[in-house]
Image (cartoon, rainbow, N blue to C red):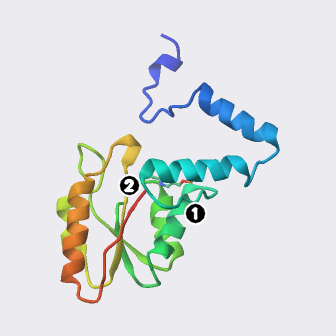
Amino acid sequence: MSKQMQNIPIAKPWLGEPEAEAARRAIMSGWVTQGPEVAAFEQEFAAYVGAKYACAVSNCTTALHLALLAVGVQPEDEVITVSHSYIATANSIRYCGAIPVFVDIEPQTYNINPILIEDMISDRTRAILIVHQMGMPCDLKAILAIAKRCCKQIAHRHNLPVIED
Ligand SMILES: Cc1ncc(COP(=O)(O)O)c(C=O)c1O
């Protein structure tokens, strides 16, 4: 058995010719930061997810940091999240000066256990930052229902935003 066959990939990137060609197109155009490819990507992505706008950034850590700031996370606020993730998830909360409050995951999906969220919500909770781990989607329906219910309970909050990592 070859050495390669002994490895069982837990999260194999799904990349092929179209992605390689897109990277080649950007490199050969001379636009390697902003430019027409980024503008087209933002428009196509917004249309795909049904949003008015999309904004491409340099990496996921920056995206999470900006999303938390955009929903108003401030120093000493609490953000519900998971520890079972890459460190960038919790770091993005700390970059805002806020406190990550960890909720346990479901062993079947490796994702946040919706049943455990509500008990961790306090009057300092400002957002819920969930992670769709290794291609397995979180139970968004249950999570959004909790976010909606809890924002009604916390009198001074207008909503409890859910950010997806
Ligand atoms: C779940 C998760 N969130 C955030 C990040 C950070 O991504 P980036 O390295 O693009 O900042 C990673 C990176 O592996 C990740 O796995």
| For residue 161, above or below residue 36 | below
Residue located 21% across and 67% down the image: 146
Image coords of residue 150 (percent x, y)? 21, 75
Residue located 44% across and 79% down the image: 73
Image coords of residue 47 (percent x, y)? 48, 50
- Name which quarter of the figure residue 71 lies in: bottom left
Q: Residue 62: which disc?
A: 1
Location of the C terminus (image quadrant):
bottom left
Beta carbon of the mark 2 residue lies under 8 A of ligand 1: yes
Name the residue carrying label 2: 131
- The answer to whether residue 113 is seen in the rendering is no
Outermost residue toward the top in this view: 1
Give the alpha-carbon distance from disc 2 to disc 1, as whole Å. Answer: 15 Å
* 137 with respect to 155 (left or right): right
| For residue 53, above or below residue 134 | below
- Name which quarter of the figure residue 90 lies in: bottom left
Q: Amino acid at mark 1?
A: Thr
Q: Amino acid at mark 2?
A: Val
Question: SS for tag 2?
Answer: loop
Question: SS for tag 1?
Answer: helix
Residue located 49% across and 80% down the image: 97
Beta carbon of the mark 1 residue lies under 8 A of ligand 1: yes
Q: Residue 148: which disc?
A: none
Q: Going from the N terminus, do you reach mark 2 or mark 1 first?
A: 1
Crowding at dot 2, Cα within 10 Å, few <14 / some 14-19 / many 20+, comes out as: many
Image coords of residue 16 (percent x, y)? 58, 27
Please name whichever residue, 12 or 34, is drawn nearer the observer in this view of the structure: 34
Please name whichever residue, 9 or 32, is drawn nearer the observer in this view of the structure: 32
Residue located 60% across and 48% down the image: 41
